[in-house]
Structures are given as C-alpha cells and as structure tokens.
Amino acid sequence: MTERADRASAGASGDSTLDGLHVQTRAIRAGRDDNQNALAPILWATSTFTADTVSEAHDMAVNTHSSRFYTRYGNPTVKAFEDAMADLEGTESARAFASGMGALSAIVLGLCSSGDHIVAQRQLYAGTQLLLQTTCPRFGIDVTFVDGTEPGAFTEAVLPGRTVLVIAETPANPKLAVADLAEVGAIAGPMTVVDSTFATPLGQRPADYGVDLVVHSATKAIAGHNDATIGVVAGSEELLAWLWNYAVLHGAVASPFDALNALRGIRTLAVRLRQQTETAAALAEALEGHPMVESVHYPGLASHPQHELAARQMDLAGGLVTFDLADGYEAGRAFVEEVRVVRLATSLGGPESIVTHPASTTHVSLLPEELEAACIGRGTVRFSAGLEHTDDVVADVTGALDRVAGIVGGKRPSG
Ligand SMILES: *Cc1c(COP(=O)(O)O)cnc(C)c1O
C-alpha cells in the first residue's frame, strides 16, 4: 500500500494545536478539547445534567449539539468520541450510535421515506443486507442491488429524482471486494454512504473522495478490544442533524462507557492496524501456496481483482483475509475447530485473531443458492488478525490446515 498513512491530515477538530500533524499523532489527542485537566478521557456516567436558569435549560434542550442536557440527546464522553472521529475522517461532524447497525438504521430510516429508492452494493455485511431486504420493503423503500466492483454500476442504477441513498461497503463482506471511492463520491444527487468498518479511518478516508456519510461499526477495530458495542457516522453538520433527530427519537444512542472504550481504542488504532496488516499480509501469502486452499482474498495481494484500486485508495490493506478451502464444508468446520492460537468467534479488529466459517455458523440457515448469492462458499473462512506474534498466527493456521488435510483426506474414499 502507499505511504499516505503518514500524510499530514487536515482534520476538522477545533484544536488548532493539531493543525498539520499526521493522522497518527492527531489520533492521540483528538476529541479531548473539553477534558478539563485530565490527561485521559473522562467517563461522564450520568443520564442527566442540571441547569441554573430556565433560559439555560431551554438552550440545552433545543441545541442539537447539546452534550449536557440528557444523555439520550448527548453526553460529553460520547461527544469526545464523536469529535475524534470527525477529526480522523476529516468531516465537519460525527454522531455515535448504539452499534454499527444503529448507525446504518439511522441512515436508512432517518433519511428515506416511503417511495424513495436506494442503490446498494450486493457485497454487504449480513445485517445491512437484511435491513435493506426486509425492513425497507415494509416502509415502501425500494432497493436496487448492484455489483460494487463493476465500474459504473452504482451510477447507472441511480434513478434521478428518486434515489436518495447510494450505499457502498469497502472492503466488503465477505470476500473483501473493493468499491471505487472516487466513483461513489462523484455521484451527484443522492447522498452517498460508505461503510468503512474494515478499513478504519487510518486505512482510508472516503470523505476525501466526496462521500457524504462514512459509517463504522466502531465495535470492531476502532474500539478494538472486543469490549464495546458502538457505531458512528461522520459527515456534514446538516446531514448529521437529521441523524441526530432519528437517534434521539429512536433511542439508538451510544452509551458513555462504550464511547470511552472507543476513544481509548482510537489512541492505539494506528499501531494495532499496522500489526494486524502485517499478520494478515503474511498469512495471505502463506495461504496462497497451501494445497488445502483453493483461493485467497486479500486487497494487499497482487492476485486480488481490485488490487490496484485498493493500493490507490487505501493506506493499509487491513487485518482481514478470506479464503476458500478446497474440501468445502467439512474442511471449513474441521479447520475452525483445529486452530489453537486463533479463536472461533464472530467479530473482527480485536487483539485476538479470530476465524469464522459462515456456512456452518452465521449463515447456516441459507440455502446453497442463497449462500452463492452472498458470495459465500461452503468452505469459505474469514480470518481477522489480532495482535499476537505474526509467526505464531501463521504457524497456527497453516498447522491446522495440515491437520485438516489429514482428517478430511482420511475420509475420502480411496482409489
Ligand atoms: C459488524 C459490522 C456492522 C454492524 O455493526 P454492529 O456494531 O455489530 O452493529 C456493520 N458493517 C460492518 C462492515 C460490520 O463488520
């Protein structure tokens, strides 16, 4: 990947001491303008705030940026996390939500009305896909799914005057397909949205390409320790005021404790992402040569179909690798039970390396043709690099694959 990760960033923080500093440096300080003299962020564990006068109470109640009225409206710890995210994404503002799905629901249901149209890519997080496929029809919102890797596909599916949102995810579930941020950002008319969870703000900055709203499940690499559930959307003040309304009325708001953990995560994100990328890249290379592996999907590999695009728009290829096992379902099941350092769990971006086998776990209820439509093979495994020593992780995964070859191979009819 390019060295743009070290670029000086023009973030949106009100803190002028951060002007012109690298994004890694900004991440250490961002969001703590209002920290009194505490060095570490303060946990504001309160549901409400007092006012001395009626006019002060009135101002607190009507100001969309009020973070000292009632915690469902805002909270200083949550605001500190939001300010840090706006700074790292280079946007005017950001809003935190109860989870990544809370953020995506707020975008879809807070910005669209009955009769509106959405263009979304087919390669999506399963929750986002279900939201678009099951919730949208109930509210009369039409969705057109396109191949997010096909040049021009998003633009061609836009219905002038009807399309309100264009939703991309890049890199995307499950096979780390990469969508072109410049193409999405250039679409005029509808609001453009990128789920940038896999990349993090240190991996790519969609707003630099003109994308209107950048979404993260901060539950993943941003909080980064598998101990917080929180989502965030970064964008303009104007759009975020709409989302704020939705969040306040629907209660999709972040808890101060999770915001504290997310803010803590931001301070170490740069070094964690670097380590996770190193492990993922080493594993992707090792897997490409392994006889049990049919195909490897990693944006940093030259064999990735959008490798050049990824190199252009991403600073780091990230910690996720998806691969397909040659012996399919049985091999996938056996593999996730054979790993020892790596754990079997659903999530990504934390300190523990994790594997999932969607066909036997998260997507077990899908018919074979539905699995295929979701780009998930019977032997597809998704790996998320943790912070263990790279060599231990690569040895664990390749060792497990060698043992699986014995198990699955042993069951094969001979001759
Ligand atoms: C996990 C995830 C989500 C949903 O986030 P939650 O915090 O679990 O609600 C959305 N998009 C992507 C890409 C994710 O990985």
Image (tube, rainbow, N blue to C red):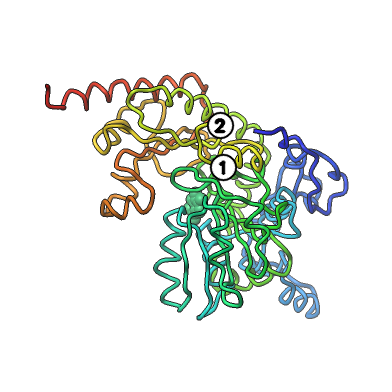
Residue 279 left/right relative to 413: right
Q: Position of residue 132 (x, y in %)?
A: 45, 66
Residue 200 left/right relative to 128: right
Badge 1 or badge 2: first in the primary sequence: 1
Residue 109 left/right relative to 236: left
Quadrant in which residue 373 is drawn: bottom left
In the rendered structure, find residue 221 and report the number of the disc placed on it.
Answer: 1
The residue under the point 81% across, 48% down is 10
Does the beta carbon at disc 2 come under 8 Å from ligand 1? no
| Amino acid type, label 2 | Gln
Rounded to the nearest angstrom, the CA distance separating label 1 from label 2 is 10 Å
Q: Position of residue 238 (x, y in %)?
A: 72, 70
Q: Position of residue 184 (x, y in %)?
A: 62, 57
Pointer 1 and pointer 2: residues touching (CB < 8 Å)? yes
Residue 278 left/right relative to 131: right
Which one is in front, 85 or 35? 85
The residue that disc 2 covers is 276
Mark 2 crowdedness (10 Å alpha carbons): few <14, some 14-19, many ≥20? many
| Amino acid type, label 1 | Ala
Which one is in front, 51 or 188? 188
Residue at disc 1, secondary structure: loop
